Amino acid sequence: MAERFSRRQVLRGLGVGAAAWAAGSVVGARSAGAPGGPPGSPLLFHSPDVVPFRGTVSPPPVVTGPSLSISAVNSRHRFHPDLPEVDALAYRAGDVGPGYLGPTIEAQADELLTLRYTNDLAFHPLGVDMDTSVHGVTESFRTAPPTSLHLHGGVTPPASDGHPEQVSRPGRSLVHGFPNGQEASHLWYHDHAMGITRVNVYSGLAGMYLLRDRWDTGRPDNPLGLPAGEFEMPLVLQEKIFRQDGTLSIRSTPIVPEGSWEGGAVGDVGLVNGAVWPEIPVAKGLYRFRVVNAASYSVWNLHFSNRMRFWVIGNDCGLLDAPVPVTQFRVAPGERYDLLVDFSLLDTGGSVELRNDEHPPFQAAVIGAVLMPVFCRFAVGSARGFTGQVPSALRGGRLRSPLPALPVPDVVRTVTVSQPYALRNPPAIMTLNNLRFADTDIEKPRAGTTERWDIVNVTPDPHPIHIHLVHFRTLGRTPLRTVDYQAAHLQPPVGIRWAPDPTPFLAGPSVPPEPWEAGWKDTVRSDGGTVTSVLVRFPTADELGFDPDALFDRPDSPESDHAGPTGADSEPSAPTHHGVEHPAHNGVDHGSGHGAAGPLQGYVWHCHILDHEDHDMMLKYRVVP
């Protein structure tokens, strides 16, 4: 039952939050040299004080080969030398894997990788924070959490995509086939289980997936002349809140009760590869950093503390035509960027910090959230590093073909991003097209067609939108008169499609994407009060080598104990439970959750703010013949 507040209580809370936000912003500006500062808003939880740059961190271990086995496991991990070792989750490949996150998987383009995934979890470190009113989440999930492994950015058969309803319960295995029929790119794999994605990823179920090809081999003799080996480093960036005893906290505010869904939380400490504010030793030379925003909520504007120049050479799904020099760039949850950074001009013994200066959205700031300012410090040693030059071109000529010209779309499709207005606790759900995940009014683009998706964001906040299976190009962002748009088209109750044409309410010309956004993407930042347009081609079965609209089984349904691109077996190694009932939320059944009968079909598209994805900013879609 939603807890309702009086107008006086709400105004009092907003006043306290606004004051805390103003004070916190000043603190953040004063502490530009180091994270931390005086206690912040009383409406927020705060991590214990730790000394920044005290610990170091190593890149995740690498696993490769045509056949791999990955398990989700309970683990123990120390996030900072000043914090105790605590419960976490991790991916392991046999004995290979850290105590948090997973190993980096290296795969070859156009070579099938068979991956056997096993859920070996015995309990969940954030089980008390699961909301059992969301998507069939039950009390049993706290001690026997289901999982679903998704290869983010992979052009993958539907049975191997990690559909949120294709879950494996503890003791169960599922065989995935990843064809890797795409160019070299920086993908990542993470959990995607319905209703609990955020707690699973936040606890550690995420890892890098680097796809190589003949142009971008990952070896020192690669044709592009890029740094390799120790000079190519994955950077998994996250934000966290820790309880005072050092354990992970998914909650940001006492306003939302324990065990209730929260609309998004800004962390107050930054992590790189599972370490809080580490110091990373570097040699004097050029480095290639593969950056992923693996956070649940925040968009960051990343830069170095001395504002030095660096280069973006690629994003989600491949390389740009040429390196783009920048001093800063924005990265939203789910996005990846490929960077070249030259430390050769810095003094031996010197250092530079990787920092963020993007403040949290208003809805977080109003209760006291402030920006999380720093992720790590790079300490420059005396050793000579990679001495190659920044390449002048990455595509074209004797290299890979340049990015193609943008075609005229066959179809223009309007979709919307909104949050129904309701003063309630826990917060109201988030929606795409004003629909719930269980609703059947879904997008059905035709295979072989090119569509322009106009993503209308009527909220004040940015939402990163991820479309499974496909890659797309960003066309631009157009300002929208959201008040006029909503006044002219009143939003109906949730469950009725709402996606009016925004054209009469555009407030100016389209702003083209930044040069570093120009390549192939699978996740796009849809800014508040804008129409973000992307151009996407939906491939045919012949082009893919598999049927994107094929039916596939739920591995834990009574009908099937198998799934995979060719029906690979999923052998049970422990008893499982089926046919779980799906509790309603606000009297509405969220339907087709864990244990529902019948096969699955198609893919999903969703906001990659994981709180929003869980409830309910995710919809199914199908690529139809």
Image: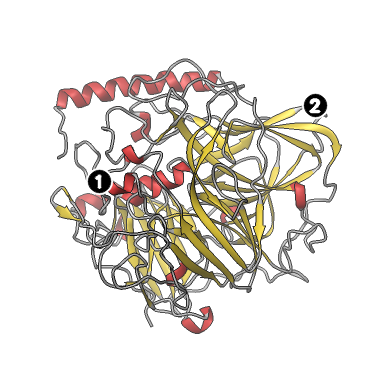
Q: Residues within 10 Å of mark 1 (few under 14, many from 20)?
A: many
**The residue tagged with tag 2: helix, strand or loop?**
loop
Q: Nearer the viewer, residue 144 or 618?
A: 144
Which disc number belongs to residue 51?
none
Q: Is residue 409 above or below residue 148?
A: below
Q: In this figure, which residue is indicated by the disc labeled 2?
A: 349
Q: Residue furthest front?
A: 574
Q: Residue 106: give x, y in percent of width and height.
A: 65, 60
Q: Are marks 2 and 1 in contact (CB under 8 Å)?
A: no
Upstream in the sequence, badge 2 or badge 1? 1
Q: Residue furthest top?
A: 38
Q: Nearer the viewer, residue 160 or 501?
A: 160
The amino acid sitting under disc 2 is Gly
Q: Residue 379: give x, y in percent of width and height.
A: 74, 31
Left or right: 39, with 79 as reference point: left
Q: Residue 265: give x, y in percent of width and height.
A: 39, 36
**The residue tagged with tag 1: helix, strand or loop?**
loop
Residue at 49 percent across and 18 percent down: it is 27
Q: Residue 26: give x, y in percent of width and height.
A: 48, 19
Q: Is residue 544 above or below residue 77?
A: below
Quadrant where the image shows the N terminus = top left
Q: Is residue 12 above or below residue 556?
A: above
Quadrant where the image shows the C terminus = bottom left
Q: CA distance from mark 2 to mark 1?
A: 52 Å
Q: In this figure, which residue is indicated by the disc labeled 1?
A: 132
The amino acid sitting under disc 1 is Thr
Residue at 55 percent across and 32 percent down: it is 79
Q: Residues within 10 Å of mark 2 (few under 14, many from 20)?
A: few
Left or right: 87, with 208 as reference point: left
Could you tell me how many numbered marks the image carries? 2
